[in-house]
Image (cartoon, grey):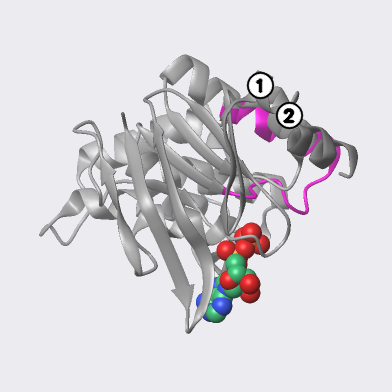
């Protein structure tokens, strides 16, 4: 087990966004969280990240991950608009939680950032301004940044939104490679159910409460899976 959610419940004011959700994710799995708009997908991801307070329930991690070292790619990042930094600086900022009390990046941090940029094919524009890049390039940079925070568990919230089909396909392949080759556990929120069932081992379908949690092969044969696949 790498992440375990027990009875996770989150409410904004009095409105419940995630309702008594429980599941365990094993190391190396590729999980897609699917559901309608407003069904609580992003909130569930944030509850794993500790970014929203739980009304009840708990989230725990296996010994292989540190709560402060999770790789996160937020939905429609505001980082994009107000990040006057170079590509290298953005990637390197993923190492922040490794620094601890150190007020600077170490040589090892920089080497790690360089390795992840190489892996994601963005080394050539390391000195360029992040905001000047295309949407697909920016997502690669943010993925490299997330990898600097962890090589164990990536949490991605709709990472392909707004990208054209070719770039979307490339990004999906990269994420699949990270999962298959590096063994990174992937938890991805996706509105694209047809892609989700192509890549993910497991599907988590929510509408506040959990509607389905299990193998993708099983999901596509359930009523809810069939209905959701048909209408999207
Ligand atoms: P999804 O990602 O599936 O579209 P969200 O988790 O973003 O859904 O939102 C679930 C519900 O919680 C929605 O009704 C949304 O309006 C509400 N919500 C999300 N974030 C906040 C917030 N910060 N404050 C108040 N309500 C929120
Ligand atoms: Mg969302």
Instruction: Please identify the residue farthest to the bottom as the structure is shown.
Output: 13
Depth check: 11 or 69 in front? 11
Q: Where is the C terminus found, in terms of image quarters?
A: top right
Q: Picture quarter containing residue 64?
A: top left
Residue 83's spot in the image, x, y percent?
52, 68
Depth check: 143 or 74 in front? 74
Can see residue 81? no
Q: Is residue 11 left or right of residue 58?
A: right
Q: Residue at x 22, y 43 (%)?
A: 66
Instruction: Please identify the residue farthest to the front as the structure is shown.
Output: 223
Q: Mark 2 falls on what kind of element?
A: loop
Say above or below: 15 vs 161.
below
Q: Where is the N terminus found, in terms of image quarters?
A: top left
Q: Residue at x 46, y 73 (%)?
A: 11
Residue 185's spot in the image, x, y percent?
43, 30
Instruction: Please identify the residue farthest to the top as the structure is shown.
Output: 181
Q: Residues within 10 Å of mark 2 (few under 14, many from 20)?
A: few
Residue 218 numbered mark, or none? 1
Say above or below: 17 vs 168.
below
Q: Magenta stretch?
A: 157-175
Residue 99's spot in the image, x, y percent?
18, 52
Residue 197 numbered mark, or none? none
Q: CA distance from mark 1 to mark 2?
A: 7 Å
Residue 222 numbered mark, or none? 2
Q: Picture quarter containing residue 96?
A: bottom left
- Disc 1 and disc 2 in contact, CB within 8 angstroms: yes
Q: Residue at x 42, y 55 (%)?
A: 89
Residue 155's spot in the image, x, y percent?
47, 45
């Amino acid at each position: 087990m790498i992440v375990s959610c027990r009875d996770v419940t989150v409410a904004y004011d009095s409105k419940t966004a995630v309702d008594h959700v429980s599941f365990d994710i094993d190391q190396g799995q590729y999980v897609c969280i699917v559901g309608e708009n407003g069904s609580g997908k992003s909130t569930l991801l944030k509850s794993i990240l500790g970014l929203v307070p739980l009304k009840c329930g708990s989230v725990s991690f296996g010994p292989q991950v540190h709560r402060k070292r999770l790789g996160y790619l937020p939905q429609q990042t505001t980082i994009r608009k107000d990040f006057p930094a170079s590509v290298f600086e953005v990637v390197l900022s993923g190492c922040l939680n490794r620094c601890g009390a150190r007020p600077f990046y170490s040589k090892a941090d920089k080497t790690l950032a360089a390795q992840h940029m190489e892996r994601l094919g963005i080394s050539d524009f390391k000195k360029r301004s992040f905001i000047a890049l295309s949407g697909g390039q920016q997502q690669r940079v943010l993925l490299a940044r997330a990898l600097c925070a962890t090589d164990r568990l990536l949490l991605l919230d709709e990472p392909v939104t707004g990208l054209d089909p070719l770039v979307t396909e490339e990004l999906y392949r990269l994420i699949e490679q990270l999962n298959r080759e590096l063994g990174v556990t992937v938890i991805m929120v996706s509105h694209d159910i047809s892609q989700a069932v192509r890549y993910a081992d497991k599907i988590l379908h929510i509408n506040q409460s959990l509607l389905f949690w299990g193998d993708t092969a099983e999901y596509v044969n359930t009523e809810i899976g069939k209905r959701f696949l048909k209408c999207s």
